[in-house]
Image: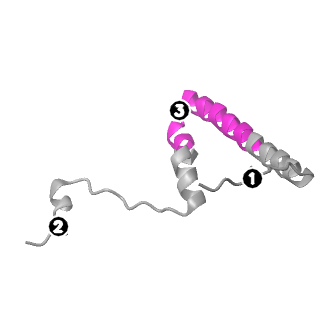
Amino acid sequence: MLRRKPTRIELKIDDCEEFESIKKELEARKRQREEAESGAIGDIMAGGGATASASTTTRAELINERIGFKPLPKPNTLPGLFTSLQF
């Protein structure tokens, strides 16, 4: 069996700068989400919960948007499940 030399991983200044910029961006998103949630809680207490909850997105939706996945809606009725089957 052939043995190869161990690979070397180097940390460059550009990598550190990129990491810091991404970290700041994620912290800003987290701060916005927390502010939106605290605002949504205030809206719910005031009686306007329908509009506040519709504007929030879930983690799965963010991931789907990032990778470009658009899931198809699931049929709600039982006959809707079998309309595409042909016998």
Q: CA distance from mark 1 to mark 2?
A: 59 Å
Q: Write down the residue under mark 2.
A: 83
Q: Is residue 14 left or right of residue 67?
A: right
Pinpoint residue 47: horizontal percent, then vertical percent: 53, 32
Quadrant placement of the N terminus: bottom right
Q: Is residue 68 left or right of residue 38?
A: left
Determine whether the residue tagged by mark 2 lies in a helix, strand or loop.
Answer: loop
Q: Per the image, is 52 magenta?
A: yes
Q: Write down the residue under mark 3.
A: 47
Magenta segment: 28-53
Q: Earlier in the sequence, mark 1 or mark 2?
A: 1
User: How many marks can you see?
Assistant: 3
Q: Write down the residue under mark 1.
A: 5
Q: Per the image, is 45 magenta?
A: yes
Looking at the picture, which amino acid does disc 2 mark? Thr
Determine whether the residue tagged by mark 3 lies in a helix, strand or loop.
Answer: loop
Looking at the picture, which amino acid does disc 3 mark? Gly
Main SS, magenta region, reads: helix
Depicted 9 relative to depicted 86: above or below = above
Determine whether the residue tagged by mark 1 lies in a helix, strand or loop.
Answer: loop
Q: CA distance from mark 2 to mark 3?
A: 42 Å
